[in-house]
Image (spheres, rainbow, N blue to C red):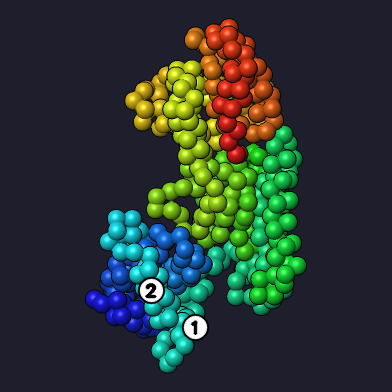
Amino acid sequence: MTTRWTLFLFSALLAGTAGAAAGDKTDVVRNLAGRVGPIVGSALACRDIARPRIQAIVDKFTAVIMEASSNEAERSDLTQSFDRSVADGRGAVTTGRTDCRSADRQLADLERSIAGPGPGPSVAAIAPSSAAAATSPTAPVAAGSPVRGVTDQEIRFGIAAPFSGSAKELGRQMKLGIDTAFNRVNEAGGVEGRMLKLIAADDGYEPTRTTDAMKQLYEKDQVFGIIGNVGAPTAVVAVPYALERKLLFFGAFTGANVLRHDPPDRYVFNYRASDAEETDAVVRYLVKLRRIPIKQIAVFAQQDTYGDSGFAGVSKAVRSLGVSDAAIVRLNYKRNTGDVDDAINQLKLQKPPIKAVVMVATYRAAVNGGRITRTIRRGCRACEGLAGHSTLRARDSCKLASA
C-alpha cells in the first residue's frame, strides 16, 4: 500500500467508520495502524518536529480505534498494534532507514489529508460518538467548550505538589516558576487570545494525599492538563490517574522511571533527565575523572521510590564498570524528615572510609546531609593528609538530585 493510499484510507475512516460492519472496521483499522504508526513513530524520533502536530494525529487515530471497536478487547488489540507500529517507526529513524526530512514530509502529507482544505474528508467529519468517547463520562466538558479546561477566555492547568510540610519549598518554587512563565505569555496576549491559568492542589509530598489533589484538579477545577507536579513517590499515584483519564501530564519535577516507559505513555511529557541518568553520570565522573574507588562511594537516598530511582542509576553505572552493585553502600533517611542520624552512624562504620556521596535527597535532608560531608572530610584528612584537596573532593562529589 502506497503512502498516498494510506493517507486516503485514513481520511475515509475519519469520515465514515460508523457505516462499516464491525469486523470490516477492525480489520481495516488494524491494517491502517501498520501504515500510520510508522509515520507517527518516525516523527517522534525527530526533535525538530513539533509534538502537538504528532499528538493531533495520534488523537485522531485513537478516535478511529474507539469508533471501530465493539468492546474493550478489540480496542486494546488495535491500540497495541498501533503502538507497535509507532515503535517500528522510531527504529527506522534511529537505525538510519529513514531520515527526519522524510518523516516531516510524510507527517505533513498526513495532516493535509485529514484536515483539508479541499473537497475531501476533514477532521470535522469524525462521527460524534468518536469525539464523545474521548471524554470521560465522570468529567463533563465545560459548557460551551469542546475541550475540558479550555474556554474562549482561558486555558486551565493544574499542579499537585507539596505546599505544606517539610518539602513545601519545592512546590512553592515550582508554582512560582510556572506562574512567572504564564504571566509572560499572558502579557503578550495569551494563546490565541486565551489566558493561561494555574490552579494548585496541596498533597504535602505524601502519596496518600495525591489522589485527592488530582481529583480536585480534574473533577472540581476541570483543568485541561497537569503541569509541574513535584515528587517521585507522588507520581506513582498521579501518573496512572492522569493516564486513565487521558489527561496531559507535562514537565513533572521528578526523574522517576514511572514517567519513562518504553514505548512512552501517550499523555506523559518529560522535561528533564531521569534520576537514573543523573546518578549514572555522577558515578562515572567520580570513578573515571576523580579516580575514587567504587567501594569508597556511598549513596545517601530517600527511602522510597525517589531514592530507589536514583540508586538504580548508581547500580547501573557500577555494573557497567564491571563491579557488583552489592558493594554499594546506601545511607537512607525517611521521606518528609530531616533525620540523618542513622545514615551518619552507618557512614562512620565504613572501612575503608567513604570519600564521596551521591545524594538523592530533598533540600531539608540534603542540608542536614552536610554532616555527612564533614564526616567524609575528617576521614579523608586521616587517610590522605591533604585537607584542602579532600574537602574539595567531598564537596564536589555530592550530588543533589531533583525531587
Image quarter in which the N terminus is found: bottom left
Can residue 349 be seen by looking at this rendering?
A: no
Position in image of residue 325 (x %, y %): 40, 24
- Left or right relative to 59: residue 206: right
What residue lies at 59% left-to-right and 49% top-to-bottom? 252
Q: Is residue 383 shown above or below 135?
A: above
Q: Secondary structure at mark 2?
A: helix
Position in image of residue 131 (x %, y %): 50, 74
Mark 2 sits on what residue? 105
What residue lies at 40% left-to-right and 89% top-to-bottom? 120
- Most extreme residue toward the left, as rendered? 1
- Left or right relative to 339: residue 76: left
N-terminal of the two: label 1 or label 2? Answer: 2
Label 1 vs label 2, nearer the camera: 2
- Left or right relative to 121: residue 218: right
Q: Is residue 394 shown above or below 246?
A: above
Can residue 296 be seen by looking at this rendering?
A: yes
- Most extreme residue toward the bottom, as rendered? 119
- Left or right relative to 176: residue 105: left
Three-letter amino acid code of the residue under disc 2: Arg
Q: Is residue 298 shown above or below 186?
A: above
Numbered label attached to residue 124: 1
Number of numbered tags placed on the structure image: 2
What residue lies at 59% left-to-right and 27% top-to-bottom? 396
Position in image of residue 300 (x %, y %): 57, 25
Between 230 and 271, the one lying in front of the other is: 271
